[in-house]
Image (spheres, helix red, strand yellow):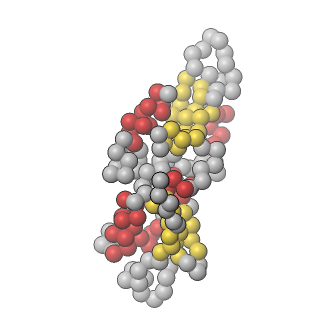
Amino acid sequence: MEERQVEYIWPSKENFPGKEQNMGLKNFMLPESSDYEKIKEYALKNYTFDGYDEEKGYLLKPIEDIIYKNMKEYKGVYYQFEKTNCWDGDLTDKLVVWFPPLSDKFTVNAEMRYFAWPNQRWSSLMKRVPHNTSILRIADTNLITGSFFQNTVNFPDYEDNVQNLIKK
């Protein structure tokens, strides 16, 4: 497998002629700007934003190099599985599949874009479901801001892999 490097970029001066702006991904999301095409090229190479450095600019790195805390991986789909904490022999096991909302599509922190936990109220979901219920949390790590769990050029079997993970 080829070794890929992290890269740094700045938004072009056409969007902010006075000086560089630290506005997160908003700097690159104007479809009419050259920055939009620049980022689209990175996205098609499976790169994503994951930070900002005042000296170097916005950090882009391969999606597979993002560190996902406490996450497992199944065919390119990242997830957490929280097994039911109490079993009652009279009840059949249930499963809640949680697809996180897009928490902040403009943040340069990849972890916060791809899944809205553990820093949000959703991390305590287990306390709010019946005891015979397990929780499967699936992160949307496709493209720069996720793909709403849909297939893309980069990940043409994403939907099937998500479905197979749920069945598994």
Whether residue 99 is visible: no
Q: Residue 137: horizontal and vertical position, in percent? A: 55, 39
Q: Nearer the viewer, residue 24 or 43?
A: 43
Q: Residue 95: horizontal and vertical position, in percent? A: 54, 27
Q: Nearer the viewer, residue 10 or 121?
A: 10
Q: Is 139 displayed left or right of 43 in the figure?
A: right
Residue furthest out toward the left? 32
User: Residue at 56% of width from left, 50% of height from top?
Assistant: 116
User: Residue at 55% of width from left, 35% of height from top?
Assistant: 136
Residue furthest out toward the top? 90
Q: How many marks?
A: 0
Residue furthest out toward the right? 86
Q: Residue 4: horizontal and vertical position, in percent? A: 49, 62
Q: Is residue 74 shown above or below 129?
A: below
Q: Is 13 displayed left or right of 124 in the figure?
A: left
User: Residue at 60% of width from left, 14% of height from top?
Assistant: 91
